[in-house]
Image (cartoon, rainbow, N blue to C red):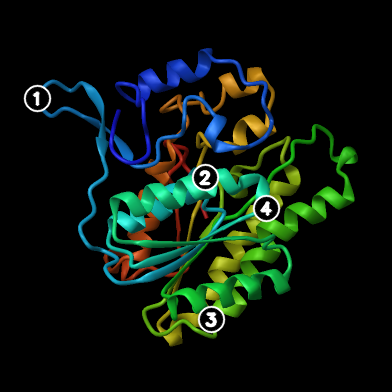
């Protein structure tokens, strides 16, 4: 057993990947608590300097976000949970974790309890659909009532729906995907910008799909392309206000979204393309969010970081 999250952690990330490829994945709930092996939230793959043997190293904060307050959408599990956890370990004073609905209550409560048990960060939970501006206003109002201010907004909530032929795209599903992945970040950002001061941070979650496309996720790929363009345009507008806007475009990441989207063979092969031939763990992606939220990235705005396992992307 290890500290905080990541109980029953395998020896290293390669052993983890072999275990993952051998298990059966028939559940399509998207609930993190029943996903095995559980995504790694606060340990980073590392190599012993003397022997070169791989192992998992616990993330250690150094006060990069001391005393700040954040709002993170889609943070009950997966990448969002790891971002909230690393932020807390970096000294965050308080965080609002937004999740879709009551079906994710157990994941959200587990995230809250585990973060508060190992840090001084206070966690506020709220279940709302970010695809509607009214809900986004309720989210922000609740955050401000709890903490009084906001320094960091992470637009991370997303959904995807596999469709083999473009002719089979359902209009309601396309709208649903755009509401979560595009409308949500725009609505949340519009509202939060009324409260961000100089030094404020906005980070959007894009995807490698925005750059290389995914044939079975056409509408999802389109939404992530929109997120990249939104990030670039917004960064230009907010630069004079000294508010930085950046994005993270992960490659394949082991989260509950994956078994909820693909069939078992696709899950077993997930992230197997070169050069790393494995999916990332959420902590490996969340570390990029720490960098962008901290003063270490003070000269970056309008940029996209690509923790994708080595796929070369341009533009």
Residue at the spot of label 1: 50
Q: Earlier in the sequence, mark 2 or mark 1?
A: 1
Q: Earlier in the sequence, mark 1 or mark 4?
A: 1
Q: Nearer the viewer, mark 3 or mark 2?
A: 2
Front in this rendered view, residue 166 or 129: 129
Q: Is residue 78 above or below residue 144?
A: above
Q: Mark 1 and mark 4: span between their CA atoms?
A: 48 Å
Residue at horizontal 55%, vertical 75%?
234
Residue at the spot of label 2: 77
The residue carrying pointer 1 sits among few (fewer than 14), some (14 to 19) or many (20 or more) residues within 10 Å by Cα, namely few
Q: Earlier in the sequence, mark 3 or mark 4?
A: 4
Residue at horizontal 37%, vertical 18%?
15
The residue carrying pointer 4 sits among few (fewer than 14), some (14 to 19) or many (20 or more) residues within 10 Å by Cα, namely few
Q: Nearer the viewer, mark 1 or mark 4?
A: 4
Q: Earlier in the sequence, mark 1 or mark 3?
A: 1
Residue at horizontal 27%, vertical 44%?
59
């Amino acid at each position: 057993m290890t500290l905080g999250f990541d109980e029953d952690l395998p020896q290293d990330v390669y052993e983890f990947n072999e275990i993952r490829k051998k298990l059966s994945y028939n559940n399509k709930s998207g609930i993190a608590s029943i996903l095995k092996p559980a995504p790694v939230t606060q340990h980073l793959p590392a190599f012993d300097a003397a022997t070169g043997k791989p192992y998992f190293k616990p993330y250690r904060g150094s006060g990069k976000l001391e005393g700040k307050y954040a709002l993170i959408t889609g943070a009950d599990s997966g990448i969002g949970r790891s971002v909230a956890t690393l932020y807390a370990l970096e000294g965050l004073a308080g965080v609002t974790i937004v999740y879709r609905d009551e079906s994710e209550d157990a994941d959200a409560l587990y995230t809250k309890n585990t973060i508060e048990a190992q840090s001084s960060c206070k966690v506020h939970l709220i279940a709302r659909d970010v695809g509607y501006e009214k809900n986004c206003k309720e989210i922000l109002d609740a955050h401000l009532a709890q903490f009084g201010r906001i320094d960091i907004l992470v637009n991370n909530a997303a959904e995807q729906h596999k469709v083999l032929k473009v002719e089979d795209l359902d209009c309601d599903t396309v709208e649903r995907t755009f509401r979560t992945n595009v409308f949500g970040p725009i609505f949340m950002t519009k509202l939060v910008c009324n409260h961000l001061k100089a030094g404020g941070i906005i980070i959007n979650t894009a995807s490698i799909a925005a750059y290389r496309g995914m044939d079975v996720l056409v509408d999802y790929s389109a939404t992530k392309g929109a997120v990249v363009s939104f990030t670039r345009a917004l960064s230009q507008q907010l630069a004079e206000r000294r508010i930085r806007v950046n994005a993270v475009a992960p490659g394949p990441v082991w989260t509950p979204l994956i078994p909820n989207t693909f069939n078992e063979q696709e899950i077993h092969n997930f992230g197997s393309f070169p050069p790393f031939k494995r999916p990332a763990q959420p902590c490996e992606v969340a570390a990029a969010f720490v960098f962008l939220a901290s003063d270490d990235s003070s000269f970056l705005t309008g940029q996209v970081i690509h923790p994708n396992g080595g796929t070369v992307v341009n533009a």
